[in-house]
Image: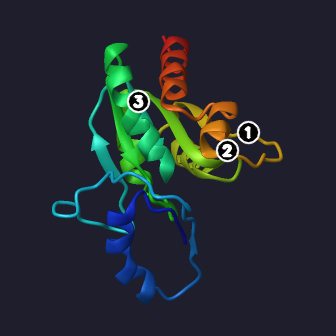
Amino acid sequence: MIYEPVDEVQLMQAMPFIIDYKGSMYIRLFRKVIDKVFDENSYKFDMYKADVLKEGKDITIVSSGIMVQETVKALPLLKEAGIDAEVISVHTIKPIDGDTIAKSAKKTGIVLTCENHQIIGGLHSAVCEVLADKCPTKAGAIGVPDVFGEVGKLPYLKEIYKMRDVDIVEKCKQLIKENK
């Protein structure tokens, strides 16, 4: 199992499952304090189910980990650009919730993945496998390309790998334009 929490609220709710899980599990954690995405009073965690954060019709954005926060930050910019994005937060990359992703892809016809990981072998690869099997759909990716990564402060890395909210907006515009 591969698990990447979005925030502390989700991680705290996942802990009982993690403790009781029988099998191998890789947990990817971020070292810095990050903003909360979920409300601890209303959020209900399910290890096997992705979270649909926002319904939309123009494009599906599937994000994991800290890229969920960048995606949420991009929402006002997307709205300003006239793009109604559906946002799915995927915390469990293996096994991935293919049903939620395929349902959304059928609705929007375009998928963008956003991950703080190499695109090859990560969330993008898993989502593309789902799309190939269940709903062939145009897909794009934001993440680290197939290069040896650099070391640096997060804002610098997000800028050089084009992983900021503004980059998400530009990639959405590009994919929508290409799909017309």
Pick the quarter of the image with the N terminus: bottom right
Q: Nearer the viewer, mark 2 or mark 3?
A: 3
Q: In the image, residue 46 lies at what x, y percent?
A: 32, 67
Local SS, label 3: helix
Residue at horizontal 56%, vertical 62%?
31
Q: Is residue 130 above or below residue 12?
A: above
Residue contact between numbered discs 1 and 2, judged by CB atoms under 8 Å: yes
Q: In the image, residue 132 lies at what x, y percent?
A: 57, 42
Is residue 161 in view from this perspective?
Answer: yes
Of the residues shown, which amino acid type is indicated by label 3?
Ala
The residue carrying mark 3 is 74
**Badge 1: residue crowd in 10 Å (few <14, some 14–19, many ≥20):** few
Compare marks 3 and 1 and give the one earlier in the sequence.
3
In the rendered structure, the answer to whether residue 77 lies left or right of residue 176 reads left
Residue at horizontal 42%, vertical 44%?
69
Local SS, label 1: loop
The residue carrying mark 2 is 119
Is 116 in front, or is 136? 116
The part of the image, by quadrant, that contains residue 9 is: bottom left
In the rendered structure, the answer to whether residue 88 lies left or right of residue 29 reads left
The part of the image, by quadrant, that contains residue 162 is: top right
